[in-house]
Image (cartoon, rainbow, N blue to C red):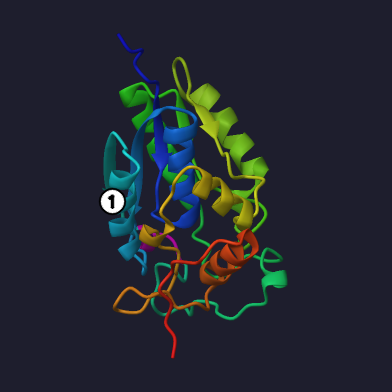
Amino acid sequence: MSTPRSRAVVLLSGGLDSTTCLAVATRRDGHEAHALSFDYGQRHRSEVEHARQVAEALGAASHRVVRIDLSQAITSALTDPGIEIPKDRPLEEMGADVPSTYVPARNTIFLAFALGLAETIGARAIYLGVNALDYSGYPDCRPEFVEAFAALAQVACPQDPPAIEAPLLHLDKAGIIRLGVSLGVDYSITHSCYDPAPDGRACGRCDACRLRARGFREAGVPDPTRYVGP
């Protein structure tokens, strides 16, 4: 008789990082993964459909999509069409400040839902794909944030709090892509762009697109992304 796998909740946006994180949880760490995505009023909500594809492709045991409208209380370029998405920012300047695409408290909110789900299903870990090297300057992608939420989980849960796992935290995009490729990730079904065209093609100019494209170049892996172009 096989031993039951331990359960893990994986925050899944359908992007490059969270997809790799799901692969780590299932294919490297051997968990029964329960994916959790959010339709929070984001302009690029097509990522939710990509998350569904990723969850199925990587064998998630379940996939939940929570619908909340963060735009009712939070202002961000990702939730307000009236705020311009930054484009063509020099790669070396990313991370130097907090851009308009930062969604205040987003990871805190998502992790709170994940913590509740973990308690409900008896999950032993929560995985999130935050990255402190190649990122746009979001404060909730830093090691200090992960450590603080892990400490919160210790006092918030009545017993057996889940571990907070951030396996990509100290990897650059190229390292993340290499890890994903080693785990058999198909990056053609992922979505990173903040401002995709109506047909789903990536703009190629926002921070997420530019970091993603550089990652593939530096990893020496063909970029399967469909970009808007001539």
Which quadrant would residue 69 be assigned to in this image? bottom left
- Residue 143 at what x, y percent from top left? 66, 42
Q: Check if residue 143 falls in the magenta segment.
A: no
Judge whether 91 appears above or below 12 on screen. Answer: below
- Identity of the residue drawn at 48% across and 80% down: 84
Q: Which residues are magenta?
A: 70-75
What element does badge 1 sit on? helix
- Residue 45 at what x, y percent from top left? 32, 64
- Residue 224 at what x, y percent from top left? 44, 66
Quadrant (top left/top right/bottom left/bottom right) for the C terminus: bottom left
How many marks the image carries: the answer is 1
Position of 221 with respect to 201 (left or right) is right
Position of 222 with respect to 115 (left or right) is right
Quadrant (top left/top right/bottom left/bottom right) for the N terminus: top left
Q: Residue furthest top?
A: 1
Q: Nearer the viewer, residue 166 or 105?
A: 166
Which kind of residue does numbered mark 1 sit on?
A: Arg
Q: Nearer the viewer, residue 229 or 195?
A: 229
Position of 93 with respect to 52 (left or right) is right
Judge whether 160 appears above or below 140 on screen. Answer: above
Judge whether 73 appears above or below 10 on screen. Answer: below
- Identity of the residue drawn at 51% across and 65% down: 222
Q: Residue furthest bottom?
A: 230
Q: Nearer the viewer, residue 3 or 141?
A: 3
Position of 185 with respect to 45 (left or right) is right
Q: Badge 1, how many Cα within 10 Å: few under 14, some, many 20+?
A: many
- Residue 185 at what x, y percent from top left? 43, 49
- Identity of the residue drawn at 33% across and 73% down: 200
Mark 1, residue position: 52
